[in-house]
Amino acid sequence: MTTAAATALVLHVPQIPGANLLNLLIVDDERAIREVCRDVALSLGFKTCIADSAEQAFRLMETQVVDVVLLDLKLPGTGGLQALRAFRQKHPEVAVIVVTGYASVQSAVGAMREGAYDYVTKPFSMEELRLLLDRVVGHLKLKTENRILRERIKSRHGFGSMIGHSPEMEKLYRIVAKAALSTHPVLILGESGTGKEMVARATHFSGSMREKPLIPVDCGSLVPTLIESELFGYVKGAFTGANQAKEGLLALAEGGTVFFDEIGELPLDLQSKLLRAIQEKEIRPVGGTKRQTINVRIVAATNRDLEQGVAQGTFRRDLYFRLNVLTLRIPPLRERRQDIPLLAAHFLERACRDTGHAQTLSDDALKAMLAYDWPGNVRELENCLERSCALVSGSVIHASDLPTVIHSAPGTSLRGGDNGSRILPIAELERNTILNTITQLNGDKLLAAKMLGIGKTTLYRKLKEYAVQI
């Protein structure tokens, strides 16, 4: 079939559901075959890239995420079978489909023994290629769903230690499951408090590196003058006080993952050194002359707009592109409000274990929480419930027991009483808050006044008005 004829047929090929989430690498030294396969794959919904040799394919797979490889067994230089073995060793998660001629079917069978997913013989029809790619999409989708299912069985609430069943979180779980299978750099984007470190941990502990170290690096808290020695280590005598050599965090994480939290805070000079370490897979300790080979995965997170940082010159463009191979965006809590009851129940259960008495949320409290936008995201929700559990002596947490900024959100009203149906006057809200605080602090009125932000004289006057003895 000619290229023109094949391209014409492409227009009538229906897309494969789910193919738009996958990247296909076509490796063939014949330009016409590469172009036809690319056109068919694009029409089916795949994202595609092409290589005319195994060597070029190796280079592409170092910097790009690849899910499926369409590999010609007859290649110049490094042969297809040798390339298949290299793919299986370095990228075992990739599904490889080998392409061979009728006269070389035996070599295709050998490739299957080496771990190829399937094979197709030349010349092949567009429908044959479509059916084969359809099968591989189903195969990869099933693997991902099985991984998510296993994590759900372990966690009950979501994926790993992440909690939520909203469509936004389900999408995140699928991408995390896919990212866990590769060793490419991962960039996690999300507002403060959304759980970026939790996603990094799920990515690490769901993959093949789970038995190796996960080393977190808080770029925002490290002293600028010490960052380099912390990351790369130093040799004895490198500076005053360096009485003995010390391994850096990148070396300590050998075979595992280094998680750079708030990567946008990293100084520019350190960005260039980190880029070199990622590209060359080696580091040079401070004060040393010898380079040390490293094998680590880089996962970075930020709440900043790195593209804007690149435009403003505060973040290196080449490092951004190096990190931005796999991107995970964590939705803010206001975009997945249906997860709030599940998250609240989880944090409430944990807080109750700490305080030793069971508490539940009233309907009005949950309504107030659902109406609030949570600018601090999941972390703010957790802190809110911990505070409420500590201050409320009863078994039910009402909206009036929540921080004022939450129960005063538009669309909510303060309710109290045993049945949660009575609107409370401000004076009664004030009385309940003061008495509950003193009770929780075992009668320490001075500390209660300090926590409530009022003077001790005001507190004693209020207690006299309430005619209570505490």
Image (spheres, rainbow, N blue to C red):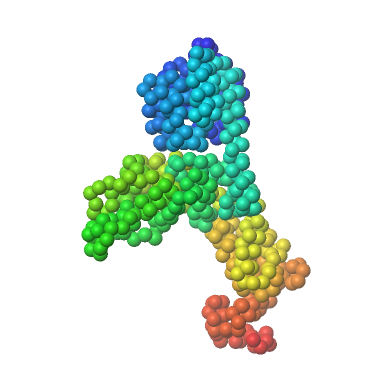
Lateral position of residue 284 relative to residue 370, left or right? left
Q: Residue at x 45, y 42 (%)?
A: 183
Q: Residue at x 44, y 36 (%)?
A: 90
Residue 17 at x, y percent in the picture: 61, 31
How many labels were placed on the picture?
A: 0
Residue 114 at x, y percent in the picture: 49, 29
Residue 250 at x, y percent in the picture: 37, 51
Q: Residue at x 44, y 24 (%)?
A: 80
| Depicted 57 relative to depicted 348: above or below | above
Residue 418 at x, y percent in the picture: 76, 71
User: Quarter of the image containing the C terminus?
Assistant: bottom right
Lateral position of residue 71 relative to residue 342, left or right? left
Q: Residue at x 57, y 80 (%)?
A: 448
| Depicted 449 relative to depicted 104: above or below | below
Instruction: Kindly indicate the quadrant of the structure image that contains residue 463.
Output: bottom right
- Residue 170 seen: no
- Residue 162 seen: yes
Between 178 and 218, the residue placed more toward the observer is 178
Lateral position of residue 67 relative to residue 426, left or right? left
